[in-house]
Amino acid sequence: MAREASRHIAIWIDFHQAILLAFEAEPFDRSILHKPGEGCSQYHVDAQQYPSIQQYYKAVLSHLQSQDEILILGPGRAKRQLCQRIEQHRNLKGKVVGIHQAPKLAEVELVFPTSEVWRSDKAHEIQVESPSL
């Protein structure tokens, strides 16, 4: 049976919108700097299109796959609430590798190092929280 390639998914989320950046993770043997449009897919979920917050989060979750490793970024509570929903999802539980405080999406440049820990080029400015609930 062929193993599906894993992806790294970075989700920047607040109560108005979610931006998902999906990067193929194979091979994972060197540091690569990714910017939107370079080797990644980008998805946008607008909260105004959904009548409830539950449907908004469900729309975000619809872009995730069981082999994904997920990094959640954002300015407030939405990132924590999304993490809770991911942990309740049978196929996604345990897939969150980190949660970062990031007030603005434009300030975040993602780097995928050789270790499993994702870092920002401004890591000293971003408070890292444990994904545990």
Image: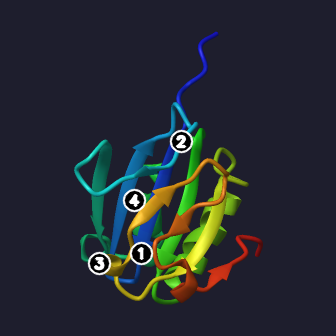
Q: From mark 2 to mark 3, how far is it between C-alphas?
A: 24 Å
Disc 1 designates what residue? 13
Judge from the rendering whether residue 125 lies leftward or rightward of residue 128; answer left or right.
left
Q: Amino acid at mark 3?
A: Ala
Among numbered discs 2 and 1, the one appearing first in the sequence: 1
Disc 2 designates what residue? 30
- In front: label 2 or label 3: 2
Q: Are marks 4 and 2 in contact (CB under 8 Å)?
A: no
Among numbered discs 3 and 4, the one appearing first in the sequence: 4
Determine the residue located farthest toward the right in the rendered image.
Answer: 132
Residue 79 % position (x, y): 53, 77
Q: Amino acid at mark 1?
A: Ile
Q: Quadrant of residue 124?
A: bottom right
Q: Quadrant of residue 48?
A: bottom left
Q: Amino acid at mark 2?
A: Arg
Judge from the rendering whether residue 93 lies leftward or rightward of residue 24; answer left or right.
right
Up the image or down, 55 lies above or below 48; here it is: above
Q: Quadrant of the N terminus?
A: top right
Numbered badge on residue 59? 4
Q: From mark 3 to mark 4, how far is it between C-alphas?
A: 23 Å
Q: Are marks 1 and 3 in contact (CB under 8 Å)?
A: no
Q: Is disc 4 placed on a helix, strand or loop? A: helix
Determine the residue located farthest toward the front in the rendered image.
Answer: 30
Among numbered discs 1 and 4, the one appearing first in the sequence: 1
Among numbered discs 2 and 3, the one appearing first in the sequence: 2
- In front: label 1 or label 3: 3
The answer, for residue 117, to whether it is visible in the render is yes
Q: From mark 2 to mark 1, how far is it between C-alphas?
A: 28 Å
Numbered badge on residue 106? 3
Mark 2 Cα shell of 10 Å, populated few (<14), some (14-19), many (≥20): few
